[in-house]
Image: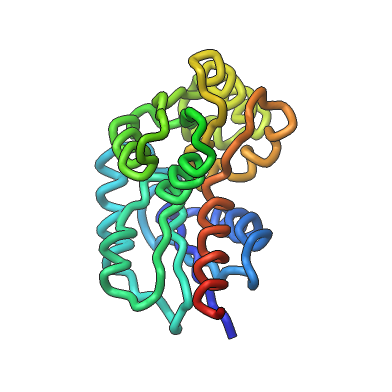
Amino acid sequence: MTEIRLMNPNSDPVVTASMCEIAARALPVAPIGWTAPAGPPLIVTPEALARAAEGIAAAEVPGRPDAVIVAAFGDPGAEALAARLACPVIGIGAAAARAAARSGLPFAVATTTPGLEAQIDALMRRHAGTVPYLGCRFAAGDPVALMRSAAELDAGLLGAIVEAHAAGAAQVVIGGGPLGAAAERLRDRAPVPLLNPVLCAAREVAALLGAQHV
């Protein structure tokens, strides 16, 4: 039986459940969630991202999964974990960049964490190839406070999406696993197509597993 793990480097099990629900829409089976046992509920600084990478790299993954999704937008520890496991390990940030690249259209990221701009920019450029990447646009307000109010989060992200569109983006990645539910809520309100990184990673995993079972 196929087994897929979704690892949340943030320490919020409610977010893990939400991301598993989103990923299940594109997977052959619902993923089994894993939540970081320690650390912040939301990664907002380079230091927290580095600590999350250490935790994911050293994590004991139960069972024998057929694939693992690392569900934080900076993909902390994904490459190190992939080096230890025999199955594919997909980071949601890289998956979103690859999905944007497949369309060939210029894209930007809308997110809530200005402290991670350099890390996000580097990840997007690394995986988007020659497709124009127009950088990050940020929701106004404190990232942690925004997560407490769906209405405020949606308004802030929509403002960032509109800014990205005005700058020439023909598609926008919603930059964060915990923002996946907001990405779905905003689809019909956004002026451009939105890429939900959790769904992008799930679709990539589904394609890989399908190829393996041919």
Q: Whole-percent x and y of residue 193?
A: 63, 33
The percent coordinates of residue 114 (x first, y second) are 38, 27
What residue appears at the point 47 percent right and 31 percent down from the top-left corner?
109
Q: Nearer the viewer, residue 149 or 210?
A: 210
Q: Is residue 95 above or below residue 88?
A: above
For residue 187, what is the image quadrant?
top right
Residue nearest the viewer, comparing 52 with 2: 2
In the displayed orientation, state which residue is furthest to the right. 188
| Above-or-below relation of 47 to 109 | below
Residue farthest toward the top in the current orientation of the protein: 166
Q: Position of residue 128 (x, y in %)?
A: 39, 40
**Identity of the residue drawn at 50% across and 68% down:** 208
Tell me which colouring the rendered structure shows: rainbow
* Residue 18 shown left or right of residue 77 in the figure: right
Q: Is 65 placed left or right of 184 in the picture?
A: left
- Residue 107, placed above or below residue 82: above
Quarter placement of the C terminus: bottom right
Could you say where residue 183 lies in the image, as x and y percent from the top left?
Answer: 62, 38
What residue appears at the point 50 percent right and 40 percent down from the top-left corner? Answer: 100
User: Which quadrant of the figure has residue 1?
Assistant: bottom right
Answer left or right for 195 relative to 189: left
- Image quarter of residue 60: bottom left
Q: Residue at x 49, y 15 (%)?
A: 167
Count of labels shown? 0
